[in-house]
Image: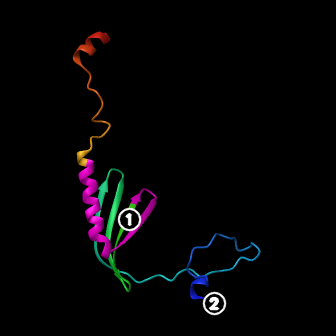
Amino acid sequence: MISNERPSPFSRRPFFPKSAPGAHYFPAKPPVHEDTLKTAEVQVERKTFIFTLKENLRGRLLRITEDSGNRHNSIIIPVTGLADFQKLLAEMSKASAETPSPADAQPQANEADDLHLS
């Protein structure tokens, strides 16, 4: 059997209740020890973004966690991709500053129009 053909004990599988026929128990993936090197937090409207630079046996990574009330979402960027991520973020920020928003495009009420409303 080729090693790629064997199912991984850590891969995602469809959920089967333990009572289902043929259901098998697969142990959870063991936790990986990570050292926190630096943490920063920024509040944007009602969301909090937590940036954590971590290191584990596989290398360094940046974990960005979005905390929105009772929901938490995270993305992990390997440190080898941080320069590309920073460049793309700068490009998006520049494009946002250069592109007018729909709120800016709304026509202003003219004083002459206000006189005809009464």
Task: Please tell me how many numbered marks the rendered image carries.
Answer: 2
The structure residue drawn at horizontal position 23% and vertical position 46%, both measured from the top left corner, is 98
The structure residue drawn at horizontal position 38% and vertical position 65%, both measured from the top left corner, is 65
- Residue extending farthest to the right is 21
Label 1: state its secondary structure. Answer: strand
Q: Nearer the viewer, mark 2 or mark 1?
A: 2
Label 2: state its secondary structure. Answer: loop
Q: Nearer the viewer, residue 83 or 67?
A: 83
- Give the mark, 2 or 1, whose residue is nearer the N terminus: 2
- The image position of residue 33, as x and y in percent, is 41, 84
Residue 94 position (above or below residue 36): above
Q: Nearer the viewer, residue 25 or 82?
A: 82
- The image position of residue 23, as x and y in percent, is 71, 76
Other residues around mark 2 within 10 Å, as few (<14) / some (14–19) / many (≥20): few
Residue 95 position (above or below residue 28): above
Say which amino acid is labelled 1: Thr
28 to the left or right of 42: right
Q: Quadrant of the C terminus?
A: top left
Disc 1: which residue: 65
- Residue extending farthest to the bottom is 1
- The image position of residue 99, as x and y in percent, is 27, 44
Which quadrant of the view contains residue 87? Answer: bottom left
Give the magenta-colored segment's residue range. Answer: 67-96
20 to the left or right of 104: right
Q: Which mark is residue 1?
A: 2
Say which amino acid is labelled 2: Met
The structure residue drawn at horizontal position 27% and vertical position 15%, both measured from the top left corner, is 113
Q: Quadrant of the N terminus?
A: bottom right
- The image position of residue 38, as x and y in percent, is 27, 74
The answer to whether residue 72 is magenta is: yes
